[in-house]
Amino acid sequence: MSKDYYKTLGIEKGASHDEIKKAFRKLAHQYHPDKASGDEAKFKEINEAYQVVGNAEKRKQYDQYGADFEQQGGFGGGMNWNDYMRQARQQSQGGGGFSGANFDFGDIGDIFSDFFGGGGGSSRRQTTGSDIEVKVDLDFKQAVFGSEQEIEVYKTAACAHCHGDGAEPGSKTKQCATCGGHGVVEQIQRTILGAMRSRATCPECRGTGSLPEKKCNECTGTGVKKKTAKFSVKIPAGIDDNQMIRLDGEGEMPAYGGRAGDLYVRVRVKPSKEFTRKQYDILTELEVSFAQAALGTHVDVDTVDGKIELKIPAGTQSGKIFRLRDKGVPHLGSSSDRGDQLVTVTVITPTKLSKKDKKLFQDLAALHAESVDAGGGLFGF
């Protein structure tokens, strides 16, 4: 029975070359035998399919004589699976192809590189140290207007004695005997597909290709030591609770060279008894008496800038909100924009009245009733 290579790759017969290539790469990563989801049989099938429909000339022949490709094993020229995998592996590592063979190893070579490493020269990658996170506590106004905070961090830093290179000052360097100065070593990895040759960073010199004749006495050659570092951190105006400030390159320094991680300062803002923040606005509450609300008054209101006078118009109802422009939180990163302060008025109804107070309210109620009967409203209510 003829194999349906299009179905194997999960594509339509009229798919473009880019669509075929994309489908192949996705399935090859999914079913590679070295992965948890790997399936060697399935991996063979998708590679067989791609070698045919991924080649314009072979695809044309397959579309016309599909069954003939099954008889040739899908790879043509008598090449077996082990030969194919060995060649693809060599391709991924920068080796040459089979003489006279017409195969596209570009994509399978890329996939093998993902699993076994590839390319010539040193495979060393610069190591980056770990990031550090510290917390700093601020009061409400410090977060609103910004501040400068001193923090201490106990971390791994470059050795001060050898300046991080791991060699005793004045010591010469020598070629690494393990990798011969190349920074990489070849390894043989046994897999279900046979022996796989790959390259890895030299474990002795860690990719540098050289070693100091004498290791640093202070750090024993690692290039790092633990120490307490002090930082002065500028907290910007308008920062909010749980936001972070990043200090580039102030985190942990990795051993044997590389780039330091980053230091993250997480801000924790202590709650205020007077103010509540909502984005860039500040919310406060103000209690006024029944008489003040009815007759109107002027009262002092606390803001983060100090006290200001607020006019309460006659007839103010409980729940009324007054907006104080530009008395809120500065916008983060802006030197001029600020939020507002929203003052919510609560009218306090008296709960304990003297005989005199009761008499006054009774007289007020009577006047209100007369006003309603006359078609008016006491105090405009």
Image (cartoon, rainbow, N blue to C red):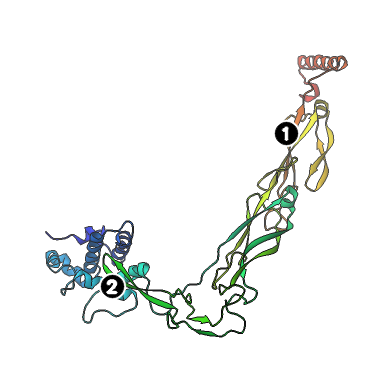
Mark nearer the N terminus (2 vs 1): 2
Q: Measured from the top left, where is residue 291 in percent x and y?
A: 83, 26
Q: Quadrant of residue 80?
A: bottom left
Local SS, label 1:
loop
Q: How many marks?
A: 2
Task: State the residue at coordinates (67%, 50%).
Answer: 268
Q: Tell which of 233 and 167 is nearer to you.
A: 167
Q: Measured from the top left, where is residue 98 in percent x and y?
A: 24, 79
Q: What distance separates the C-alpha of mark 2 from that of mark 1?
A: 77 Å
Q: Residues within 10 Å of mark 2 (few under 14, many from 20)?
A: many
Indicate which disc residue 320 carries.
Answer: 1
Q: Measured from the top left, where is residue 251 in percent x and y?
A: 60, 64
Give the residue pinned by disc 2.
88
- Badge 2 amino acid: Ala
Q: Measured from the top left, where is residue 229 in percent x and y?
A: 68, 64
Q: Decide if residue 64 is on the left or right side of residue 124.
A: left
Q: Tell which of 102 and 256 is nearer to you.
A: 256
Instruction: Decide if residue 104 is in sight here.
Output: no
